[in-house]
Amino acid sequence: MNNQMELTNIGVIKDLFERHGFSFSKALGQNFLINPAVCPKIAEMGGCREGVCAIEIGTGVGVLTRELAKRCDRVIAIELDERLKPILDETLAEFDNVEVIFADVMQTELSEIVNKFGNKETVICANLPYYITSPVIMKILESRLSVKSLTVMVQREAGDRICAAPGTRESGAVSYAVRYYSKPKLLFRVNRGSFMPSPNVDSEVIKLEITNENQLPKDIEKTLFRLIRSGFSQRRKQLLNPLSAELDITKQELSDVFSELKIKPTARAEELTLENYIELARRLTTE
Ligand code: SAM
């Protein structure tokens, strides 16, 4: 296997599958990239270069893994499907800077992987399995890993929502949560024909630059995410309703706090800024 073109060639992939008796698992979100332009772009825009180490989630046949390995000092990839092992032994054979861990990313202690890289700058790059996009992103952000950025392919609607500025109609609970930890940016769009098998949705690559700007005490942080989640669970209603139920306080008490913080009592979830939610969380966290 000597160039990237080959792992995006349908004939090469089919041959690998046949020789190793592999078939796609829909349940594991296995849509593999076959557009040769995409993986080099993810690696470049994701900050992969000499002196940098990368974590990948979900290797598939290793098409992105190879691009990361070409540019980075070291790559550690996590893949759930052990049936891919013999394929990856072949497709990654020429690299001595790659390690694949066969495990569920949701059960993996990612900080231990980052620690293996010592003081080197670390980035995360992935074409994420769509069925766990938000949980994976939130797990990474909430673990406060010492990584510079997270560059991931996600379903287009999910990416647009993640990148939507809080306070806009497109925003959702995830837009606020992501912005608490990072600066999200849409990098480029990828159409469904770039994958095999082709999914019935389009995708896009987004980059989250980890900022670590907001570091509230744990109990206030917990209230913050409770407020955001419960507010958006009934986004058409005035916030006072879901929040008073969630926090078990009267609407009048909550309305007083709103007016103290200059938030209008009729506001809906998306009308508040992240700073409004932070102020509310500070004010409403009980000792
Ligand atoms: N990176 C490859 C590519 O771009 O062609 C594969 C991307 S595919 C969308 C997602 C990959 O994640 C699959 O290989 C799948 O087996 C793997 N995967 C699914 N669930 C996982 C989990 N919980 N932990 C780790 N890997 C997972």
Image (tube, grey):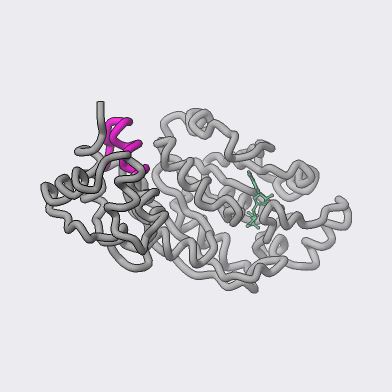
Q: Is residue 68 left or right of residue 181?
A: right
- Of residues 245 and 117, the one nearer the viewer is 245
Q: Quadrant of the N terminus?
A: bottom right
- Of residues 253 and 132, the one nearer the viewer is 253
Measuring from the top left, give residue 271's x and y in whole percent.
26, 61
- Of residues 28 and 12, the one nearer the viewer is 28
Measuring from the top left, give residue 242's x and y in whole percent.
34, 51
Residue at image point 25% right, 57% down: 272
Residue at image point 36% right, 43% down: 246
Q: Is 154 above or below relative to 201?
A: above
Q: Is residue 30 left or right of residue 174?
A: right
**Residue sitting at the far top:** 287
Q: Main secondary structure of the magenta part?
A: helix
Total tally of numbered discs in the picture: 0
Q: Is residue 190 left or right of residue 29?
A: left
Q: Is 199 above or below relative to 287?
A: below
Q: Which residues are magenta?
A: 214-226
Q: Is residue 141 visible?
A: yes
Measuring from the top left, give residue 198's x and y in whole percent.
68, 69
Measuring from the top left, give residue 237's x and y in whole percent.
34, 61
Instruction: Give the quadrant of residue 200.
Output: bottom right
Q: Is 81 above or below relative to 101?
A: below
Q: Quadrant of the C terminus?
A: top left
Instruction: Tell me, yes or no, whether the highlighted magenta stretch contains residue 219.
Output: yes
Instruction: Tell me, yes or no, whether the highlighted magenta stretch contains residue 106.
Output: no
Instruction: Give the quadrant of residue 168.
Output: bottom left
Q: Is residue 51 visible?
A: no
Residue at image point 51% right, 67% down: 156
Residue at image point 14% right, 47% down: 256
- Of residues 258 and 121, the one nearer the viewer is 258
